[in-house]
Structure formats: structure tokens, C-alpha cells
Amino acid sequence: MKKVYRQSRWQNIIYRMNQSVLLSMSVIIGVIIAATFNLQQQDSYQALHIYIVLFVLLTVWLAVFNTGKEKLIEHGVDISDYGISYINYGEKETMSWQNYHGFEISSAFLGLFRTVILKGRDQQRITFNYYAFSSLQRREIIVTLRMKTHE
């Protein structure tokens, strides 16, 4: 059995928006606190603009230049007979099925931000964003994890 789930371009945009909302919320809260105490409002607004510009530039770079045979796997899950791997911008983190002990889906901010946590018997943890993959891919990944949990 070998199956690689790769994040689609569209799903990557949704994932980035999800991550940006979380980051922006923290920056906006900081701006509100700074405005409340009248602390360097200009610096806070500049930080917000920098986050937005960096998000747009990285998204455009990935959409335009990350194509073809040398395309970098932005986010992926590789399931094989040996184990499961999470790929994050080409970096692969692997857990063998022998070490696999189960998984958990944690939530924050009323379920808007979810994380999948793969647990190993040796305290190894692999985490990835629940929304990094399409609903069909998530379903297939979760079904496989549940099946392996009960083996």
C-alpha cells in the first residue's frame, strides 16, 4: 500500500488563509492593546501591513513558480506499508506503524483551527493542520489512521 496525499493549489490557498487569519487575529489584538494604551500605533499598523505583504508575496511565489517536475510538495501525507510521513515544504517527518499509537484532532477558537496529532509509542509526535488537505483527503487519511489504531 502506497498513497501520497498532496495539497492542491486551491487547498493551499485556503490553508494559507486559515493560517493568516490566526496570525492576523493575534496582530490585530496587539494593535487594539497598543491603541488602548496609546503605544506606538504607527508601529503596530506597519507590522500588520508587513504580515499581509509577506502572505501575498509567498502565495504568489508558490502559485507562479512552484510548478513542473521540480515542484516542491508544500504539504503532503505519505502512507505506506512501513508507516506514515508528513511532508512540509519538502521536509519529511516519518513515523513507523510499529511506533504508531493513535491520533488526536485538537481544536481551537470554536473549531476554526484544527490540528491532527499523530502519537508514537516513544512520545514522538507529528502534527499538521487539519485544513491542509481537502475534505476527501482528510476523510481517507482519518479512515486509515483509525484502521491502524485498531490493528
Image: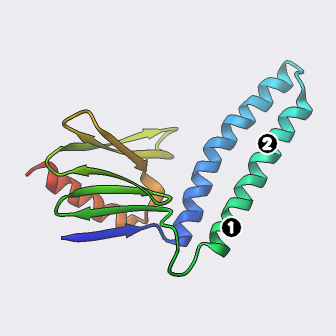
Would you call the spot at circle 1 few (<14 residues within 10 Å), some (14-19), or many (20 or more)? few
* Residue 47 pos. (x, y %): 80, 39
Type of residue at label 1? Trp
Residue at x 63% of width, y 67% of height:
62
* Residue 145 pos. (x, y %): 22, 54
Type of residue at label 2? Leu
**Quick one: which residue is furthest to the bottom in this view?**
68
Mark whose residue sits in front, 1 or 2: 1
Would you call the spot at circle 2 few (<14 residues within 10 Å), some (14-19), or many (20 or more)? some
**Quick one: which residue is furthest to the left in this view?**
151
Which residue is disc 2 drawn over? 48
Answer above or below: position of 127 versus 84: above
Which residue is disc 1 drawn over? 61
Tell whether 68 sits left or right of 101: right
Q: State the image quarter where residue 16 is shown.
A: bottom right
| Element assignment for label 2 | helix
Residue at x 68% of width, y 67% of height:
61
Disc with the residue nearer the chain's start (1 vs 2): 2
Looking at the picture, tell me which residue is in the foreground, 55 or 28.
Answer: 55
| Element assignment for label 1 | helix
Placement of the N terminus among the 4 image quadrants:
bottom left
Residue at x 41% of width, y 62% of height:
76
Tell whether 51 sits left or right of 148: right
Answer above or below: position of 52 versus 62: above
Residue at x 42% of width, y 45% of height:
115
